[in-house]
Image (cartoon, grey):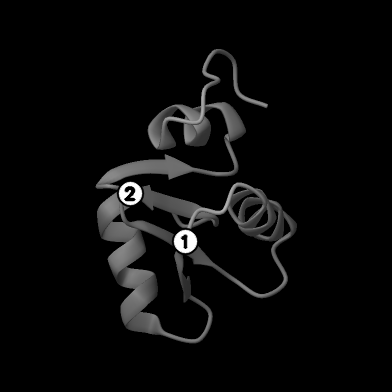
Amino acid sequence: MVAVKIYSTPGCPYCKMARQFLAENQVPFEEIDVAASQLAAQEMISRSGQLGVPVIDIGGQIVVGFDRNRIKQLLGLGGGGAPA
């Protein structure tokens, strides 16, 4: 399985949905709290060009926001098409 990282903050509802989706699909992931680490926040910005969360790294492919269909596609869980 590909490595999955979620750059998030504790109060972000879309981050929570992304974590829940991955857990429901039994996808292991590393969560990186960008509110707690300026270095992690800079890494997220340099990789994605985005200031907002979540930013999800799936095997080196960056997904900005909780795009369920794109996440499913990158993880090989089926799906694709328009963002949820």
Q: Amino acid at mark 1?
A: Pro
Question: Viewed as shown, does residue 27 lie left or right of 3?
Answer: right
Residue drawn at (70%, 60%), measured in percent from left and top? 16
The location of residue 44, given as percent across then percent down, is 35, 62
Residue at the top extreme of this rendering:
81
Q: Which disc, if any, is residue 83?
A: none
Q: Is residue 34 visible?
A: yes
Q: Which disc, if any, is residue 28?
A: 1
Residue drawn at (52%, 18%), measured in percent from left and top? 80
The residue at which mark 2 appears reads as 1
The location of residue 35, given as percent across then percent down, is 53, 79
The location of residue 48, given as percent across then percent down, is 33, 49
Q: Are marks 1 and 2 in contact (CB under 8 Å)?
A: yes
Residue drawn at (33%, 49%), measured in percent from left and top? 1
Q: Which element is circle 1 on?
A: loop
Tell me where residue 38 sits by quadrant: bottom left
Q: Nearer the viewer, residue 52 or 70?
A: 70
Height in image: 66 above or below 32?
above
Height in image: 41 above or below 54?
below
Tell me where residue 20 sits by quadrant: bottom right
Answer with mark 1 or mark 2, whichever residue precedes in sequence.
2
The span from disc 1 to disc 2 (Cα, nearest Å) is 9 Å
Tell me where residue 40 sits by quadrant: bottom left
